[in-house]
Amino acid sequence: MNKAFSGGCACAAVRYEISSEPVFMNHCQCLDCQRRSGTGHGSYLSFMDRKSVKLEGKAAQCDVVADSGNVKTHAFCPACGSPVYLTYAAMPDVITVHAASLDDPGQFKPQAITYGIRGHAWDDLDPTLPKFDKMPPAASS
């Protein structure tokens, strides 16, 4: 039996629970992730079945155009401002959660670095991880 992935914002006003396994776990060094994290990258877990995710609380949302040209929606707590999850206009079944929002951040096991072309020398990430200049093509499921 899989252990659920649960988490939420810093003040617990926005919570989630996901019983499926992530399809991708990555560090992203795109400019948007840098700005939102306040550092050199964001760390994420992506899941395929957005409809099966249990969400509690009302997240505020902000749409941005990603480096890919597609719109992604950032969901964050309107009370404490913590980023919690992302959704994508081009991939409506996918939901991505911020690794630091997990109740057990040890569940995050990064598989790759994306948008490495935007990385900074001072943002040291695991050199053994595959590094992609942009987002790698999706693997067939």
Image (cartoon, rainbow, N blue to C red):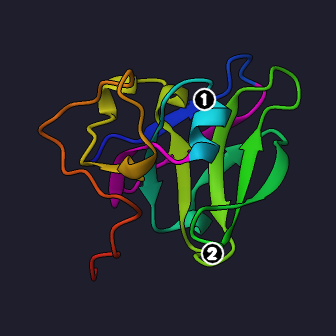
Q: Nearer the viewer, residue 88 or 55?
A: 88
State the image coordinates of residue 29 (x, y, percent, origin top left).
46, 43
User: In this picture, is 63 found above or below 136?
Assistant: above
Left or right of 25, for residue 40: right
Q: Is residue 77 magenta?
A: no
Label 2: element kind: loop
Kindly identify which residue carries mark 1.
37
User: Which quadrant of the structure image shows residue 23?
Assistant: bottom left
For residue 92, the mark is 2
Which three-letter amino acid code belongs to the residue tagged 2?
Answer: Pro
Q: In the picture shown, does residue 84 fall above or below 19? A: above
For the magenta stretch, what is the residue range? 13-30
Would you identify the image quadrant in which residue 60 lies? top right
Q: Position of residue 124 (x, y in %)?
A: 30, 24
Q: Which residue shows up at 24% across the image and 48% down it?
A: 111
Examine the structure image and report whether residue 22 is included in the region drawn in magenta: yes
Q: Which residue lies at the image location 30% right of the left edge and 57% below the top edge?
A: 132
Q: Residue at x 57, y 70 (%)?
A: 68
**Element marked by disc 1:** helix
Q: CA distance from mark 1 to mark 2?
A: 24 Å
Residue type of the residue flagged with mark 1: Ser
Q: Is residue 16 visible?
A: yes
Q: In the visual, does 11 lie left or right of 35?
A: right
Q: Is residue 21 visible?
A: no
